[in-house]
């Protein structure tokens, strides 16, 4: 997933017509029989965020039968599980659910007939949902649960036609990570369990349905859809979307799905996708998921991107016309190796997904766009980390988070799992040498392919294949400090940026003497440089200073979310009320949590700002995803409960 750090490099592909359905094996097409049967996680792994008991019984395959009901904002149907009874004495299947209505549970007998099974749905826990316990005294090879979702399902977003770009057709999409899959499918909702799946989905005929599976670019829009995912995936990568969607090809194995007005713009923005795939394959081995398509969602999508296999979900906020925010695609594509192929076994090990992916993303950016741009990306992320790390969250600053410290899996620190994780890998790369470290990573992805692993498994593998193989490069104490200590070790590699140095000098000259940078130079600034220019400003500026910046750079009303999420908080802190109208329009138009929360966080600090935040949120809430809604509601509630400072 990508919901923090500047999203700059996900470029998409060569807008050429599809000439073949999939790449040949040499280009990375998956060979499922060879690579999809190794998904075994040690039984000792305990996931505190799941009720499931995979040490007793595990889901091997999931078969979904679902109907999309836009009118009632509901998915209804059944989930059939092919089960592996690991413990031959076990007689219960325990599943995770949240706000599901369970209608019936049946088990398949040895003669092929189905019998009713007893089940119990426990009272709901606010975070984990309800434990579903199914009695299976005969340890049925297959069990089927018939159910319906709630209109308020935390993992589903239902949009009226007015909330879409086309304004004609309703839209629905899922967001299963971290533990929201359980709100639309009863599952063993833990990354330690991987399964194959098929699905038969019906919908109104004007809605195209897609899933994280084998979407056919030529599939007719007829309201009846079949899907198959032959590679084993964890539950958080289960995904579905339905709406007025069309396909725009980028290359033979990649393309864009989007609403009709967005599709050509997105395909042009993401035109480097095939190059990204080829670059990553050269570094870390074949792409094993056959196709890589991108679904551009409506602006209410709460994250920058979600790495659903074969079908990345992406925010439209990165489609700005100049490819300056396409590192998002590099990030989500990189997950095809780090995360989707080799997966963290619990949310406590999230850095194994996001840290590795952020490192690979940076390598893709460097290869395609140059080291200068990659370095700027790193500096921006590390500056965000410094702002995020405080004395109050030290427990979440260690890469290896201790059991119990992470209460809600959605609350991992971005700075830790993304930036510190990638920084650690850069440290190892510099110490062991890029050639040796690339070979190590490629071996790591091959060794753990289609498995869910813990930090300890990575530690054991790294000790055998790095520390012991190349003695004297990194001590065990240095290695352990990165993993187990809070903060950033003193031996962290520095990343200089000559272009940022020039921006720093220009900012200082303006702050000291009021002299704006030379227009010829600043007109050539990239998004990264403009972001760095704003981020280096004092906490507050005078209204006149903000007016001068606005006159020169038109920050207020910018269509670029990365600039907006930095400019508007500065405007709020500085009392620059001239930006309020544009600020409100931005918060109502965009539901991406990373982009809107900094402004809400600043607004609620004063009584007038809190009132404005509530006013804006009341208008924006209907189009926000439940995840973003929850974040905003929590900030407003906390501010209302605290004593307000005098204005």
Image: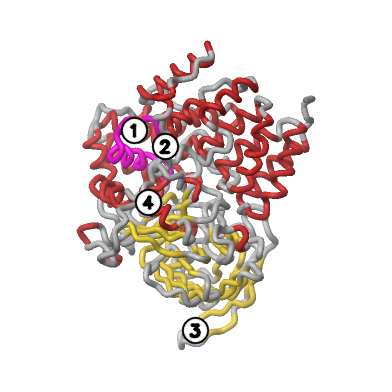
N-term mark: 1 or 3: 3
Judged by depth in the image, the label closer to the viewer, 2 or 3, is: 2
Magenta-span inclusion, residue 374:
yes
Q: Main secondary structure of the magenta part?
A: helix
Magenta-span inclusion, residue 564:
no
Q: In this view, does 90 lie above or below 503?
A: below
Q: Give the range drawn in magenta.
A: 353-378
Residue drawn at 65 percent across, 35 percent down: 601
Judged by depth in the image, the label closer to the viewer, 4 or 3, is: 4
N-term mark: 4 or 3: 3
Residue drawn at 49 percent across, 57 percent down: 236
- Tell me how far mark 2 sits from mark 4, CA to CA: 32 Å
**Marks 4,3: beta carbons within 8 A:** no
Judged by depth in the image, the label closer to the viewer, 2 or 4, is: 4
Q: Regarding mark 2 in the picture, which secondary structure is present there?
A: helix
Q: In this view, does 586 lie above or below 390?
A: below
* Residue 474 placement, left or right of 256: left
Residue, disc 1: 426
Residue, disc 2: 421
- In this rendered view, identify the residue nearer to me: 188 or 371: 371
Q: In which quarter of the image is the C terminus?
A: top right
- In this rendered view, identify the residue nearer to me: 24 or 317: 317
- Tell me how far mark 4 sits from mark 3, CA to CA: 53 Å
N-term mark: 2 or 4: 4
Residue, disc 3: 109
Direction top: furthest residue: 513
Residue, disc 4: 268
N-term mark: 2 or 1: 2
**Residue 554 falls in which quadrant of the image?**
top right
N-term mark: 1 or 4: 4
* Residue 363 placement, left or right of 326: left
């Amino acid at each position: 997933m990508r919901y923090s750090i500047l999203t700059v490099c996900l470029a998409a592909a060569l807008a050429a017509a599809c000439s073949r359905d999939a790449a040949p094996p040499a280009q990375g097409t998956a060979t499922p029989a060879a690579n999809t049967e190794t998904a075994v996680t040690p039984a000792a792994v305990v996931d505190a965020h799941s009720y499931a008991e995979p040490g007793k019984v595990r889901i091997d395959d999931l078969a979904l039968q679902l109907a999309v009901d836009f009118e009632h904002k509901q998915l209804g149907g059944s989930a059939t599980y092919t089960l592996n009874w690991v413990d031959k004495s076990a007689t219960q299947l325990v599943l995770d659910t949240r706000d599901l209505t369970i209608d019936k549970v049946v088990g398949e007998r040895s003669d092929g007939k189905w019998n009713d099974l007893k089940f119990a749905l426990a009272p709901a826990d606010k975070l984990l949902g309800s434990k579903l316990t199914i009695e299976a005294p005969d340890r049925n090879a297959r069990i089927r649960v018939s159910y319906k979702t709630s209109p308020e399902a935390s993992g589903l977003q239902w949009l009226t036609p007015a909330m879409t770009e086309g304004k004609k057709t309703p839209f629905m999409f899922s967001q299963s990570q971290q533990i929201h899959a359980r709100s639309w499918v009863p599952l063993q909702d833990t990354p330690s369990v991987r399964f194959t799946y098929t699905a038969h989905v019906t919908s109104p005929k004007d809605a195209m349905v897609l899933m994280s599976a084998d979407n056919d670019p030529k599939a007719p829009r007829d309201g009846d859809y079949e899907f198959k995912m032959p590679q084993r995936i964890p539950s958080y990568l289960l995904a579905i979307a339905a709406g007025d969607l069309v396909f725009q090809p980028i290359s033979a194995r990649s393309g864009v799905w989007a609403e009709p007005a967005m599709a050509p713009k997105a395909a042009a923005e993401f035109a480097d996708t095939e190059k990204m795939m080829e670059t990553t394959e050269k570094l870390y081995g074949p792409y094993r998921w056959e196709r890589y398509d991108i679904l551009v969602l409506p602006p209410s999508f709460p994250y920058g991107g979600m790495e659903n296999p074969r079908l990345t979900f992406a925010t439209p906020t990165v489609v700005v016309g100049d490819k300056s925010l396409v590192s998002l695609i590099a990030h989500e594509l990189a997950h095809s190796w780090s995360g989707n192929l080799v997966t963290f076994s619990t949310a406590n090990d999230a850095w194994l997904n996001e840290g590795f992916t952020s490192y690979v993303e940076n390598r893709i950016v460097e290869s395609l766009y140059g080291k200068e741009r990659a370095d700027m990306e790193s500096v921006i992320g590390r500056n965000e980390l410094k702002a995020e790390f405080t004395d109050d969250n030290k427990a979440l600053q260690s890469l290896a988070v201790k059991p119990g410290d992470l209460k809600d899996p959605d609350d991992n620190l971005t700075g830790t799992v993304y930036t510190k994780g990638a920084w650690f890998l850069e440290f190892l790369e510099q110490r062991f040498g890029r050639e040796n470290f690339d070979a190590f990573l490629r071996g790591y992805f091959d060794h753990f392919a289609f498995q869910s692993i813990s930090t300890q498994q990575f530690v054991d593998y790294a000790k055998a294949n790095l520390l012991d193989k190349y003695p004297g490069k990194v001590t065990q104490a240095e290695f352990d400090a990165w993993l187990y200590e809070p903060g950033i070790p003193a031996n962290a590699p520095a990343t200089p940026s000559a272009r940022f140095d020039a921006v720093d000098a220009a900012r200082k000259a303006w702050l000291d003497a009021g002299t704006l940078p030379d227009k010829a130079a600043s007109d050539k600034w990239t998004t990264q440089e403009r972001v760095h220019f704003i981020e280096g400003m004092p906490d507050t500026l005078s209204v006149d200073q903000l007016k001068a910046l606005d006159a020169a750079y038109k920050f207020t009303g910018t269509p670029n979310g990365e600039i907006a999420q930095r400019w508007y908080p500065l405007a709020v802190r500085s009392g620059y009320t001239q930006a309020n109208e544009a600020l409100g329009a931005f918060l109502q138009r965009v539901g991406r949590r990373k982009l809107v929360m900094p402004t809400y966080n600043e607004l609620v600090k004063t009584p007038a700002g809190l009132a404005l935040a509530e006013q804006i949120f009341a208008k924006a809430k209907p189009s926000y995803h439940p995840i973003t809604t929850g974040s905003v509601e929590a900030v407003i509630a906390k501010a209302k409960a605290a004593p307000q400072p005098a204005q």
